[in-house]
Amino acid sequence: MSVQRESTARRYGHLLWRVLRPLDPFRSVKAALGGLVIISVGITTVLLLLAYRSDIGLQVIAIIAIIASLLVTQFVAQGLASPVLEMTSAARAMARGQYERRVRVTRRDELGDLAHAFNRMAADLQAADRQRKELVANVSHELRTPIAGLRAVLENVVDGVSEADPETMTTALRQTERLGRLVEQLLDLSRLENGVVPLQARDFRVEPYLTTVLADARMALGRGHARTDVKLRLDVVPGGLRARADPERLDQVVTNLVDNAVKHSPRNGQVTVVARPGAGPGGLVLEVRDEGPGIPQAQRDLVFERFGRGTIDGVQAHDGGTGLGLAIARWAVDLHGGTIGVAESRRGCRIRLTLPGNAQANN
C-alpha cells in the first residue's frame, strides 16, 4: 500500500509541476519575460516612491530607473540569446559536415528542450552519415568476391587456359547474376532501419546449394586474397538434408565466413563447411571451421561489429579485409531470426550459425 501511495503522490507531483511550469521563470521563457516586466515596473515604482519622500529630483529618479531596467533586460536577454547563438554556430558547423558538434544544455525551459531536440537531431544525422559511409564499404566488400570470380573465368578464357565452352560461360553468367543480386540486396540496407527488408525464404536442398556456393568460392581463390593453397571441404549429414531460408542471404553468410576462414588459414590448410539439421522443421545448423589461430575469448563479440577487426598477439592482421564480413553475416542471420557466434574449438576457429527454419517470405 505504501508503494502505491508513493506512486500516486509522485504522479500528482509531476502533474502539479507541469501545471505550474508556465509560472516558473526557470522553466518557462514566457514566465521569465513576465518576470522581467514585473521587476522593471517594481524598480520604477520603488524609485518613484523614494523621489516623493526625498529631495532627489524626479528626472534623476527616471534616469536611474531606466538604467536599472536596461541592466536587468540585458542580463535576461543574454541568458535567452546565449543558447540560441550556440545552436546557430553548431548548425553552421553541421552544414559543413561536422555532425559531432553538440550544444550545452544549461536551461530547463523551452530553450533547454530545444537544445535537447537539437542534440538528438545532430546524433541522428551523425548516425545517418555513418550508415552512408558503411553502405559504401559494404558494397565494396560484397562486390569483391563475385567480381574476382568473374575476372578469373574471363582471364582463363583470354589466356587460353580454358575454352569458352557452355560450362565456363555458365559459371561466368552465374557470377554476373550474383553480382546483380548483391547490388540490389545491398541497396536494401537503407530499408533495414525501417524494419522493411525483403526476405525470400523457400525450401531447398542443402548439399547441392552449398556445393554451388563453395564452387563459386573456389573460383575466387587467388583473386580475393591470393590463397590458392587452402582446400575447401563440405560435410552435409544427412545427404538429403533440406532447410528453409533465403538462399541469397545465406549465400552472403557462407561466402563471407569461408572468405574469412581462408584468409586466416595456415599454409596448405583446410576450411570445412559442416551442415546438420536444426532443432525444428526446416531448421539448419551450419559451421565453418578453419585451422588458423582462432579468435580470443575477449574479441568474440568485437569481430561481429561493423569494422571490428580481431588481433593476434595484440597486432591487427593486415589481410586486406575491411572488418565487415562477419558483421554482414550476423545481419543476414538476424533477418532469419537465427543466431551466429564463435563456438569452442580445440584448433582454429569455428563459427556456428543456427537458422530456425520458420522464416517467412516478404516483399
Image: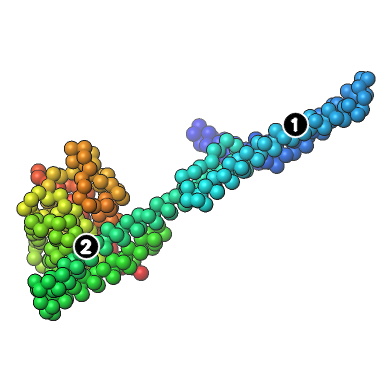
- Residue at the image position 72 percent from the left and 35 percent from the top: 74
Q: Secondary structure at mark 2?
A: helix
Q: Crowdedness of circle 2 by 10 Å Cα count: few (<14), some, many (20+)?
A: many
Give left or right: position of 327 versus 5: left
Residue hosting label 1: 71
Left/right placement of residue 229 relative to residue 64 reads: left
Residue position for label 2: 145
Q: Quadrant of residue 270?
A: bottom left
Q: Residue furthest top?
A: 54
| Percent coordinates x, y for residue 79 in the rendering | 65, 36
Is 84 placed left or right of 315 in the picture?
A: right
Q: Position of residue 29 (x, y in %)?
A: 67, 41
Residue drawn at (39%, 62%) of the image: 191
Whether residue 110 is visible to the viewer of this picture, yes or no, is: yes
Q: CA distance from mark 2 to mark 1?
A: 70 Å
Q: Amino acid at mark 2?
A: Thr
